[in-house]
Amino acid sequence: MSAISEENVRGGSVFKDIGADDEDSQPTEIESLCMNCYQNGTTRLLLTRIPFFKEIIVSSFSCGSCGSSNTEIQSAGRIQDQGVCYALKVKTKQHLNREVVKADSATTRIPELDFEIPPFTQKGSLSTIEGLLDRAVAGLEQDQPARRAADPEVAEKIEQFIQKLKKLKDVETEFTVVIEDPSGNSFVENPLAPQKDEALTVSRFKRTVQQDMQLGLRADDDLDEEPSSDLEAMRNEVLVFNTNCPECNAPASTNMKLCQIPHFKEVVIMATNCDSCGHRTNEVKSGGATEELGTKITLHITDPSDMTRDVLKSETCSVAIPELEFELGMAAVGGKFTTLEGLLKDIKDLIVSKNPFICGDSGPTDRVQKLNEFGEKIDKVIAGEINAHVILDDPAGNSYLQNVYAPEPDPEMTVEKYTRSFEQNEELGLNDMKTEGYQEGN
């Protein structure tokens, strides 16, 4: 059995990046019991890192005695701050080929068939939409012989449903696949990136107390809300607490400070520095409540100096650049307090450098070229060579773009306030703020 060295564990290099040139990466082999024949088989574990899905553990079991085998995938990274829900309208057979990362905490639904796979009933998997359908069919067919012997009528109804699931792969009619994951660690491919995918809807949501309990983030008997913080103490000092590095998982520290942004509001800035791998990250959350109105900020970039403007992008804010036909949904790059140049570089890294399903040796040539061209256009926007607009749309009203002419109006920037839709209130977890009159009127 190959071993994981102490140096690797402490140095933060346990999780290896996937790459065609890495010939030294070998799985760890462990002798383990086969649950089919109860003889000893072999489990192979590979600790690796996939962008969008953080660190993962890929395991494969095989038994030499009975030939039984299975594979599964588990997230080894941290649980995200918000849950995520992907809704894909499957209209063509090409949609069945989309890559899907499904965590074991995710719920899979097909509303048209009133079909649901509850969370924690399947192991995590890296598959496709077609693979999810095949796995569901295989799970239903597994106990059919016993059902036919015990209750033929029930077995016949399940067989009819199995045929409906199989029929979906012909895509004769449109259907929807919904993957809802409170851990935020599931993912559905957008083959049109960096453009918006009209067939795919991505939304973020705040976990319920019950979901926190399922994920082990809260004790089963802990039904109380988290205690309130001493705001005065936070204003006067930097709070430090221990955490793990999001890149190498080594012990690190996070600094938290409550700051006042001029002409805006208070925000909480959290910065994590890792001494092991040098990784640095910062995250910003609004220090106040959700505003009564949403905010849409549009900046016309007319000069390279615009890149130095301060930007507060909350985790509920989406970013659009109409000239590049680009739109980035809320929470894709998290909450940030940076400059406009920093935000655009983060977008480029997310879409081009860290896209696991398009870049790399296995990525289709046309897609790789398309992503590279998008990266070049982002660079030209930063350099002021492309006349472009940047739109920050935050239904929570907690995002900000610096007005360099303050307190006078900025001739190149417009700020619009708007009333949130019923769906936006749902995404922000404001169900308790919706009255019957609002629901009926909207």
Image (cartoon, rainbow, N blue to C red):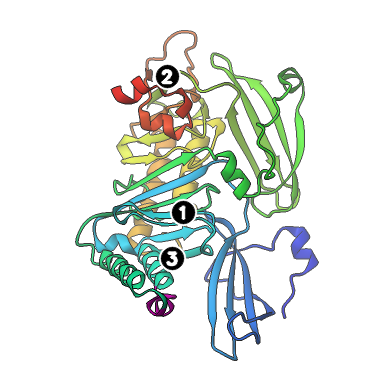
- The residue indicated by pointer 2 is 293
Q: Label 1: few (<14), some or many (≥20) within 10 Å?
A: many
Instruction: Determine the image quadrant of residue 321.
Output: top left
Vertical relation: 397 (above or below) 408: below
Comparing marks 3 and 1, which lies closer to the viewer? 1
Residue 110 among those drawn in magenta = no
In this figure, what is the number of numbered marks?
Answer: 3
- The residue indicated by pointer 1 is 107
**Residue, x 29% and y 53% (percent of image)?**
112
Vertical relation: 143 (above or below) 370: below
Say if residue 364 shows up in the picture.
Answer: yes
**Mark 2 near mark 1, Cβ–Cβ under 8 Å?**
no
Q: What are the residue bounds of the magenta stretch?
A: 141-149
Vertical relation: 356 (above or below) 415: below
**Residue, x 48% and y 45% (percent of image)?**
84
- The residue indicated by pointer 3 is 127
Quadrant of image for the N terminus: bottom right
For residue 410, side relative to residue 219 (left or right): left
